[in-house]
Amino acid sequence: MGKTILTVDDSASIRQMVSFTLKGAGYDVIEAVDGVDGLAKMTADVGMVITDLNMPNLDGIGFIKKVRANPKTKFIPIVMLTTESQAEKKQAGKSAGATGWIVKPFKPDQLLGVVKKVMR
């Protein structure tokens, strides 16, 4: 497979869980601690992004807007993985350019199902 997924979350335990799940399914994973770090690690080689919403320095919405503004990365699928489930938060994510939304805590099968569905 060898597809690379960038995971952006300020929680080390969530990054570890997401990374473990994805690597176990054969994906390469790049971890970032917030939106600023995520932008620094974002390349056109990334096949998909999984990002948290609430993070210091640059939140998930700001991060998505910046990824979408870059011609080299604007079509990369981005899934929000967050504790937020309110309709207005989801709408804000969708408006920013999020491809999908998963509410924490997540089940590994659920995460992999979404990855398989949206990965380019």
Image (cartoon, grey):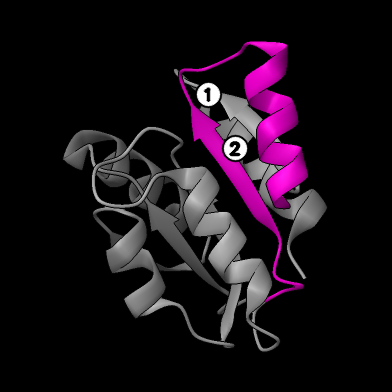
Q: Position of residue 57 (x, y in %)?
A: 25, 51
Circle 2 SS class? helix
Question: Which residue appears at 36% of the width and 52% of the height?
Answer: 19
On screen, 84 above or below 27?
above
Q: Quadrant of the N terminus?
A: bottom right
Q: Could you tell me if the residues under marks 2 and 1 are in contact, i.e. CB atoms within 8 Å?
A: yes
Disc 2 versus disc 1: distance between alpha carbons? 6 Å
Q: Position of residue 53 (x, y in %)?
A: 46, 36
Question: Which residue appears at 78% of the width and 55% of the height?
Answer: 118
Question: Which residue appears at 31% of the width and 39% of the height?
Answer: 55
Q: Position of residue 63 (x, y in %)?
A: 48, 57
Q: Residues within 10 Å of mark 2 (few under 14, many from 20)?
A: some
Q: What amino acid is found at the position of numbered circle 1 in the picture?
A: Lys
Q: What amino acid is found at the position of numbered circle 2 in the picture?
A: Leu
On screen, 14 above or below 58?
above
Q: Residues within 10 Å of mark 1 (few under 14, many from 20)?
A: few
Q: Is residue 114 magenta?
A: no
Along the horizontal axis of the image, is 115 left or right of 63? right
Question: Which residue appears at 76% of the width and 48% of the height?
Answer: 99
Instruction: Report which residue position mark 2 lands on.
Output: 111
| Numbered mark located on residue 58 in the image | none
Circle 1 SS class? loop
Q: Quadrant of the C terminus?
A: bottom right
**Start and end of the magenta stretch?**
74-97
**Corner quadrant of residue 87:** top right
Give 112 or 77, whichever is nearer the viewer: 77
Q: Of all residues shown, which one is farthest toward the left?
A: 12
| Numbered mark located on residue 107 in the image | 1
On screen, 44 above or below 59?
below
Q: Position of residue 48 (x, y in %)?
A: 61, 65
Q: Is residue 89 magenta?
A: yes
